[in-house]
Amino acid sequence: MEITLSENLKDLRYKKGNTQEDLAAYLDISFQAISKWERNETFPDITLLPKIAAYYNTSIDDLLGVGKIREQEKIADYYEKGDDYQKKGDLDGNLAVWTEAFKEFPNNYVAMYYYMIALILKNNSRENPNEYADEIIKIAERLLKESPGHRNGVISKLCDIYTRLGNEEKAVEYAKKATLIENTEAHLLSQIYKGAKLVETVQLNLLREFVYLADDEIYSMMWNGDLNRNGQKKACQRRLKLYEWLFEDGDYGYYNTRVARIYADLAILDAVDEDFNATDKNIDGVIDNLSIMADYEIKFFTDKSNSKRTSFLVNRTQLEGGFQGYSSSSDNACKWGLNFMKRNWFDLCREDKRFKEIEKRFAKYAN
C-alpha cells in the first residue's frame, strides 16, 4: 500500500492556506523538517501524526492516504460490478451500482462520472429520452466546474443532452467551450515529438482522432443535414474512402466494425424512400449491402490477432481486434447485426433466401 503523506501534507496545507512555518510552530519543530516531509525525504515521528491530523481536521488514515486508497479500491469494485451489468445489458443494475457509489462517495469524480454515464445510458433507452435530463445536467455541470480531466467528455454529453431537449442555444454554448482540435493533446504531441515517437503518435492520431472524427462528422451531416438521398449515398461513399485511404491493403482490424456500419447505412438508404417508408425498389441493393456489412462485422468479431496493422500510415499501431462487449450492452458485433436486420425497414425482403442466409451467418457468432 503506497503512503502518500508528502502530497497529502502539501494539499492540506494549501487548502488551509497556511505555511510550513505555521505547522512547524504548532508542532514545536523546525520548518525545515516540514519541508523534508513534503519533499518525501523523511517522515514525521509517529507520535506527531495525531497532532498533524487534528491540526488539519482529518483522520490519520486520510493523512497517510490510506483512506483514499481504500476509496479507490471500493470504486474499482463498483466499476467491476457496473461493467458486469452492462455486459448483460442490464442498465437498471448498472444504474443502481453507480447510484450507490455516488451516494457513498459524492465527491469522488470517478464515481460522479460513471453515475452520469449510467444515467445517460438509461436515459437513452427510455421512451421518454429526457427523464433523467435534469440529473445528468446537474452532474455534468459539476464535473465541468470541478474536474478538468473530464472536461471534453462532459462537454460532449452536455451538448448531446441539450440537443435532445431541443435547446440548441445551450448546446451551442457548451460546444463553444470545447477545445479546438489544434489545441488537443493528440495534435500538440505531434508537434513535440521527433523520430520514431513522432511517427507512432501521428499514426495513432490518424486512427483515433482524425479519420474516426471525420467519419462521425460526415455521418452527422448525412443523417441530420438537408442532403437528398443521392447526397446521403455519396456521403457514405466518402466515408468508405476515408478508411480505404488509411488502410490501403484492406487490413482494417478493429475498424472493420466502422466499415460495417457504413454498409448498414447504405442498406437503410436502399430499403426506404425519402420519407423513410419501406420500399421494394432496390431489394438487391439492400441485400448486397447487408451481406457486405456481415462480412466486416464477422471479421471484426473473429479477429483476435491484436497484431499491428500493415498499411503504411498505420503500420506502427496496434489496436484490439474483435471483442465480446459492444456498444455498452450485451451485444457483440454479430448480435448487433442480427438485431439490426430485425428492423421493419427490411420486412419487404425478409423472406428472401439471401436475407435468411445472412441471418444464419450472423447467428453463428451472435451468442
Image (cartoon, helix red, strand yellow):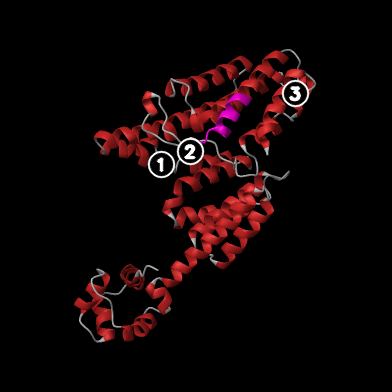
CA gap, disc 1 to disc 3?
47 Å
Q: Residue type at mark 2?
A: Glu
Of the pair 184 and 314, the residue shown nearer to us: 314
For mark 2, give the secondary structure.
loop
Q: Residue type at mark 3?
A: Lys
**Residue 214 position (above or below residue 1):** above
Q: Which residues are magenta?
A: 294-304
**Which residue is disc 1 drawn over?**
179
State yes or no: residue 299 in magenta: yes
CA gap, disc 3 to disc 2?
30 Å
Residue 182: x percent and y percent? 35, 35
Q: Residues within 10 Å of mark 2 (few under 14, many from 20)?
A: some
Q: Residues within 10 Å of mark 1 (few under 14, many from 20)?
A: few
**Which residue is disc 3 drawn over?**
356
Q: Residue at x 49, y 30 (%)?
A: 253
- Left or right: residue 16 versus residue 257 is left
Q: Residue at x 67, y 15 (%)?
A: 285
**Residue 188 position (above or below residue 247):** below
- Left or right: residue 220 versus residue 72 is right
For mark 1, give the secondary structure.
loop
- Left or right: residue 348 versus residue 31 is right
Residue 208: x percent and y percent? 44, 35
Q: Residue type at mark 1?
A: Thr
**Which residue is disc 2 drawn over?**
320
